[in-house]
Amino acid sequence: MDTNQYIPYQVRIADIIDEAPLVRTYRLEFTDPSANFTFKAGQFAEYGVFGEGESTFCIASSPTREGYIECTFRSSGRVTKALANCEINDIIGLRGPFGKAFPIEEWYGKDIVFITGGIGLPPLRCVIWNVLDQREKFGKVSIYYGARTVADLVYKEELENWKSRPDVDLFLTVDPGGETKDWKDNIGFVPTIIEQNLPSSKNAIAIVAGPPILIKMSMPILAKCGFANDKIFTTLENRMKCGVGKCGHCTVGKTYVCKDGPVFTYEEVLQMPQEY
Amino acid sequence: MKELQIKAAELLENGTVNLLIGFSEDLGKRPVPCFIETSAEANMLVFNQECKNNLSVYLHKKEVKDAVKIGLVANVATLRSVLQLLSENQLWSLTLTYLTVNGAGELVVLSSAEELEAYVQANFPTCRPEDQEMIDKLNAMSREERWAFWKDQLSECVKCYACRAVCPMCYCTVCTTECNQPQWIKTSAQTSGNFEYHTMRAMHLAGRCINCGECGRICPAGIPVHLLTAQMNQEMEKEFGGKTGWSLKGGYALNTFKPGDKENFIK
Amino acid sequence: MELKLISTSDIAVFVDGLLKAGKVVVAPVLKQSGKVFFKPVQSFAEVATDYIQTAFSAKEVVFPKVEELFTYQHNEDGSLDIKDQLDRIPETVVWGLRPCDAAGFDYLNKFFLQENPDAYFKARYDKTTLVTISCSKCDESCFCTSVDSHPGDTKGSDILLTAMDGKYYVEVMTEKGSLLITSNSTLFTSTDTLSKDAFLAKPVTHFAMEEIKDKIQNAYASVEWKQASMGCFSCGACAFACPTCTCFDIQDEGTQDHGKRVRCWDACGLSLFTKHSSGHNPRNTQTERRRQRLMHKFKYSVENLGVVSCVGCGRCIRVCPSHLNIFENILSVTK
C-alpha cells in the first residue's frame, strides 16, 4: 500500500452531518486497524466512490484528534453527488495524505488570523482545531467567517462554541439580505467586516481561503494592516486527479498544486502564472 | 497564385475582410492553414490541389469569430460545409467572403450566401472514387464481416478526438463525450468505448456530413473514419432524399418532420 | 559500455531468437493505412524498415493508453477486494526505436520515478529493454539537433545499433542491454570505437537549446501566442503521439459493486483538462492551453527535472491536422 499510491484505503462512514444545503461532513474510520494513517493540517486526500470516481477535498479534521478523520464537501459533480448518496457504514476509498501542510510549528507564539467564507472554512478548520487544541502555544486567535446566508454557514455548532470562547475573537457575518429575523451577528461581506475590525500584523500570521473574490478583496486589506506577503498563507484548489504530481491536471506553471501545495504563501502565489 | 494574393490583399486593405483564412507553405512545401490580418501578408497565400484542409472548421473558434468580417480561401468541399452550416443557422454573426478557384483555374470571389449556394450547386462534388470503392466494398460485406472490419480498425483509435476537432459540423459546445452525468461514452481508448464514440458521431452527423474526408485523412492512427460518416450519409440520402450541403434552406432528415414521412419502422 | 558488430543478415536471427526465448518484442509494423506503428511482432519478417518515423511513439509499452490500476469487488460478507496486476508484466524488448524515442524514455524515467515513484511505470520499465537504431534519413519535421540530441545519440537506449555497409555497429550502454547480447553472444563480435558520422542523417538545426532556455523565461507574456495557436482546435493528437507527454485521467469503469479503476491518456490541449466542477476554467482559451504545452516542454520541465521534455521527433508536427509547428512556434514566441 505504501509503494502504490493509487490503491486506496478502505474507510467506513461513521457519522454524517448535514452542514448546509448540499454540504455534508463525513466522519471516517479506517477499516484496517493497521492502517496507521497520519497527516498534518493542510494536507488533502482523494475520496472515492467505487464505480464513480474520486474527488479531492482537504482533510477537515486535525491530527490532534485521533481515531477518525473528517471531510466536508459540497455536492456539485458526479462523484460528490454519489458521495452524498452514501449512508452510515458504507465503505468508500481514501488515498492520501497528499500535499504540503501548513507550517504550524513555525507559528508558535504568534497571533493567528483566519479569513474565510462559505465552503472555504473546511480547509481551515483543520488548522483552527490544531491551534485550539494547543491553545497555549499561540497568541491571539481571530476568525473572520461569513457566508451568503445563515443556512450556508458550515459547522454551525462549532461556530457557537468558538463564539463563546474568551480566547477566540470570532467575527461572524452573512451577506446583506442573507440574515434571518433572529440573526444577532454582523451583516456585510467578509472584507467589510475585516475593515471594521482590522487585525494587527505585529507578530501575526494570516491564513486566507475561500472563494477567489474573497481572497482578491482581502489581500489589499491585509497589506494595509502591514502583513508581508510571506506572512499570508492560502490553500489553492485546482482540478486534481492523482494527487501525487503525475497526471498534470493541477499544474500552474511549473508548480503542481497537489505536491508542491496546496498550501502556499501569498508571495509564492504571486510568482506563479495567474492560471488557477 | 498571383491573382488570389492580389485579391486577398485588396480585401484586407479595403476592410471588406478583417481576417483571411487560407493556406501558406511550410518548410517542406506542404500547404498549411494560415491566418492573415494585413495585406502585406497576402503574398504568402497559395492554393492548389494539395490544399485539402477544410478551413470552415476555424469559423467556430472564438478568436476567429471576434474578427466578424472573415475571408475564406476554400475548395468546393469547404464551400459545401459552409452552406450546410448556414442552413443550420450557424455563422450568423459573421460576414463571409469566399475565394475559390474553378475548374478552369480562374479565381472566383463569392460575397453572399446566395452566390455561395449558386456556385456550390453548379459545381457540386461527387464522392471521391477511392472512397466510393471502399463504401461499395463495405456495403457488400456481411454484417459479421463489417463488424470485424470496424472492430479491427477502431481498436487502433486512441480517442484523441482529432476527427471531432477537424469536423466543421462538430460544433457542439458540450460534446456527448464530455458529459459525465451520466458517462455516456467511456473516456478510455478501448475497443468498446471507441465503438461507442464513433457510432455516436456517425449518428450525430447523419444527414449533415458532406464527406470532405478530413476526419479520415488526418486521423493519426490511420483509421478511415470518414467512411463511417460517408456511408451513413449515403444511407440517409437513399432513405430520405435530399443532399447535404446543397441548399441554404434549413432542415435535414433527422431534425425535420413531414406528414408524409414513412413509418414502416413502427410494427 | 561494450562495442560490438553484428552482420545485417544476423539481425533477423537475433530478433527471432528473442521471440523464441519468450520475450515480447514490440517493433515498427507497417499497417494498411501506410503508417507505421509499434506493435508486438511474432517474427522479424513483420518488422518495417523503410520509413522515417512511426506515427505514435513507443511510450505505450511503459505507459499504456489504458492501464488498469486495480479491480474492485464487493463480497457477500460486505468486505471489498482490491487487486492490482503489477506482477503480470512480461519481459519486453522494444526494437527499432529512434534516438529521439530513446531520449523520450529517458525523460519518462525521470518524470515517473524521480519523485513519488510510480509503481506501474516502474513495473513495466524494469522489464523493458530498449534497442534503438540510428537514423540514416530524416524529414523536415525532425529537429533532434535543436534539442541537444542527434541521429546517433545513445541517451536512454540500452543498445544503439547503427547500420554501416552490411553490418550494424552495436553500442551496448547498460546492464539490460548486456544481458540481451549475452543471450545470443555468438552473433556478435567485439570491435573498437567506430565513427558513426557518415551513416547518420543530417536534420536541420533550427535553434540552439541554451539560447531558447534563456529566452523562454520571458515568453509567457509574448503577444505571438495568439497567432501561434490560431490553428489549434483542441484535440489530443499531438499529446498522444508525443513520446514524452505523460498527462492522464483516472476513471472508474463498472458499477458500484464491481469494476475497475483505470488511468488513460489525457491532454492539456483538451478544453476540459483544467475545468473545475464549478465551471471555472483556469485555461479557458486555446491560446492559453497551447502556451501551457510549449512552456511545459521547454521551461517547466527544465525547472522541475533539469531537462527539456521535447525530443525533436516531429510527430506533433506530422499528426497535427492544422500542421502547427512546434519549433516555428518556439522561435516566434522567443523572438
Image (cartoon, coloured by chain):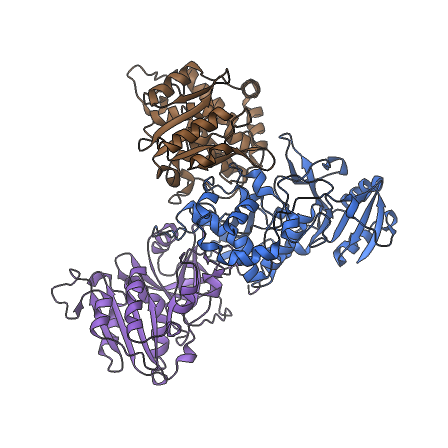
* Residue C253, percent from left and from top: 48, 46
* Residue C64, percent from left and from top: 59, 47
Q: Residue at x 49, y 66 (%)?
A: A32
- The answer to whether A155 is drawn above or below residue A105 in the figure is above
- The answer to whether B256 is drawn above or below residue B34 in the figure is above
Nearest to the observer: residue B169 or residue B152: B169
Q: Residue at x 52, y 52 (%)?
A: C334
Nearest to the observer: residue A48 or residue A98: A98
Nearest to the observer: residue A52 or residue A234: A234
Chain in blue in the render: C
Q: In this rendering, would B132 be left or right of C285? A: right
Write down the quadrant of residue A222 in the picture.
bottom left
Q: In this rendering, would C113 be left or right of B208? A: right
Q: In this rendering, would B235 be left or right of C3? A: left
Q: Is residue B62 shown to the viewer in this render?
A: yes
- The answer to whether C158 is drawn above or below residue A182 in the figure is above
Q: Colour of chain B?
A: brown
- The answer to whether B136 is drawn above or below residue C312 in the figure is above
Q: Residue at x 41, y 74 (%)?
A: A63
Write down the quadrant of residue A188 in the picture.
bottom left
Write down the quadrant of residue C319 in the picture.
top right
* Residue C297, percent from left and from top: 55, 53
Farthest left residue in view: A181
Q: Colour of chain A?
A: purple
* Residue A1, percent from left and from top: 55, 63
State which quarter of the image contains the N terminus of chain C: bottom right
